[in-house]
Image (cartoon, helix red, strand yellow):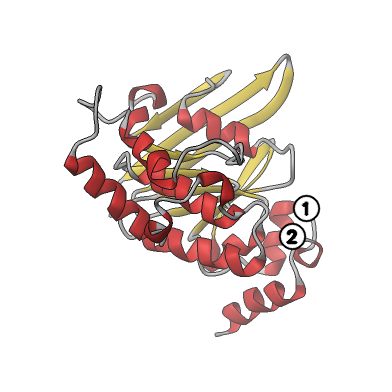
Amino acid sequence: MYKPVIETKNVWFSYNGNLVLQDITLTVSENDFFAIIGPNGSGKTTLLKLLLGILKPTHGSIRIFGKEPCKVAHRIGYVPQDTLVNKDFPISVLDVVLAGRLGYPGHFIRYSNHDLSIVRHMLETVNMWDHCNRRIGVLSGGQRQRVFIARALATEPDILLLDEPTTNIDLKGQIKMYEMMRDLNKRIPVIVVSHDFTVLLGFANLVAYVNKTLHIHHTNELTSEMFEKISGSPLEDMCPVELISRILSRKTN
């Protein structure tokens, strides 16, 4: 029996009087690769910020490892949606990931050999160690995302949250990114906010469709009919044909 790491109960959130999220109840366990999907403006990033403790719910409760999110922030690795940087800013890949060690307990002045070892391991994990001395601004979008994932991992988190990690990455790059997350999920729970339905195809085991309210399902039970019921739109309108065929073929195998 896997332990729950995230539990929300009847969470509502409004911004300036406008309802953004309504009655959100979910449980994420320690083995889950959890995808939060939905259209732009549906409340996905807001839900992520609530889980991070950046925002507080208008009503309801959120517990991560049994505590309020702000009390376990040091146990959460976070990769933001916007990883664009000034291309002329003179900071290396190594320095970006080392910055992830600054918030680690006991770090105030300088990095230790242990810090350097951790950072190298995390860059190797995301296949970016060979780029450690390159300037962050000259990397491709996919490479930059990998570096920021390494920075989040350098905090040695107990859970990893990512907001739109495959934005501006082609389909092949998206699949590679999800494969890497699946490998990470062998050690820690992974939560991905995305509008990219590719994440459903053999990677996430749990998916929530968010559009103010939340509908949740295990992906191994998800059929095209269920998807249409959950999202309110036919699956064919949301995914490339090749991806639809992969979903349907998985159901018949």
- 118, above or below 64, in the image: below
Q: Nearer the viewer, residue 183 or 10?
A: 183
- Residue, x 71% and y 24% (percent of image)? 19
Q: Nearer the viewer, residue 98 or 168?
A: 98
Q: Position of residue 157 (x, y in %)?
A: 32, 41
Q: Which residue is mark 2?
A: 228
Task: Using the rendered image of the protein, determine whether residue 185 is visible from the camera's viewpoint.
Answer: no
Q: Position of residue 111 (x, y in %)?
A: 24, 34
Q: Which residue is mark 1?
A: 232
- Residue, x 59% and y 78% (percent of image)? 251
Q: Position of residue 1 (x, y in %)?
A: 28, 55
- Residue, x 41% and y 58% (percent of image)? 126
CA gap between label 2 and label 1 equals 5 Å
Count the numbered circles shown.
2
Task: Using the rendered image of the protein, determine whether residue 131 is visible from the camera's viewpoint.
Answer: yes
Q: Give the label on residue 247, or none.
A: none
Q: Secondary structure at mark 1?
A: loop
Disc 2 vs disc 1: Cβ atoms closer than 8 Å?
yes
- 86, above or below 177, in the image: above
Q: Residues within 10 Å of mark 2 (few under 14, many from 20)?
A: some
Q: Secondary structure at mark 2?
A: helix
Q: Position of residue 69 (x, y in %)?
A: 40, 27
